Image: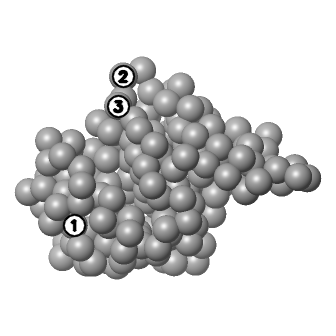
Amino acid sequence: MKLNPMLPKHRLILLRHAKSAWPDGVADRERPLADRGRKAASVIGAYMVREKLIPDLALVSPARRAQETWKLVRGAILKKVEHEAADIYEVPAERMLDVIRGVEPGIRTLLIVGHNPGMENAASLIAPDGDADAVRCMREKFPTAGLAVIDLDLDGWDEIAAGTGYLERFVTPRSLG
């Protein structure tokens, strides 16, 4: 399915948390961002603003590194964005779809900040087709702070399923220079 990228009914933005630190004795959920991760999250936030990829709602994993990533991205966005913690820590792609299906249809652009392998698997499941370069890059690797932009021709989020999206773009901090 090829969508007109200028007129999607809904847009899903999947952002893998930025690079985290591995301090001794810190539980996985409590790991903070590394310096490199803080810089990458800021780069992605600035890119999202430049490209007008502003969500109406952000669902963010409760893990510290995801929350810190969102805080830095949100800092670049001038518009107030509703956000909430979502039960997406270490979940498979199908569970991610269940979370998305619960979003109100009036939310046109949804951002999810989460973890691999769930983010990568959800993106590949929802949007197996799209911009050829974006699909190739995403399949090679969905690194920390990777951003997948998926356009959907759905009347509501409850209709999201495998193959319903078009990968409009995939960017990483490295690809942005």
Horizontal and vertical percent position of residue 114: 52, 55
Q: Is residue 12 visible?
A: yes
User: Which disc is residue 79 wearing?
Assistant: 2
How packed is label 2: few (under 14 Cα within 10 Å), some, or many (20 or more)?
few
- Which residue is disc 3 drawn over? 82
| SS state under label 1 | loop
Residue at 70% across, 38% down: 38
Mark pair 2, 3: CA separation: 10 Å
First in residue order: circle 1 vs circle 2: 2
Q: Between marks 1 and 2, how big is the CA–CA gap? A: 26 Å
* Type of amino acid at the residue the image marks with label 3: Glu
User: Is residue 81 depicted above or below 69 in this figure?
Assistant: above
Residue 63 vs residue 146, the one in the foreground: 63
Residue 160's disc number: 1
The amino acid on which the numbered mark 1 sits, given as a three-letter code, is Ile
Mark 1 vs 3, N-terminal side = 3
Q: Could you tell me which quadrant the N terminus lies in?
A: bottom left
Question: Callout 3: 10 Å neighbours few (<14), some, many (20+)?
Answer: few
User: Visible in this render: residue 8?
Assistant: no
- Residue placed most toward the observer, 119 or 39: 119
Q: Is residue 15 above or below residue 85?
A: below
Q: Residue at x 15, y 66 (%)?
A: 159
Residue density around tag 1, few if under 14, some if 14–19, many if 20 or more, within 10 Å: some
> Are discs 2 and 3 less than 8 Å apart at CB?
no
- Locate residue 102, reporting x and y percent: 24, 55
Colour style of the rendered protein structure? one colour
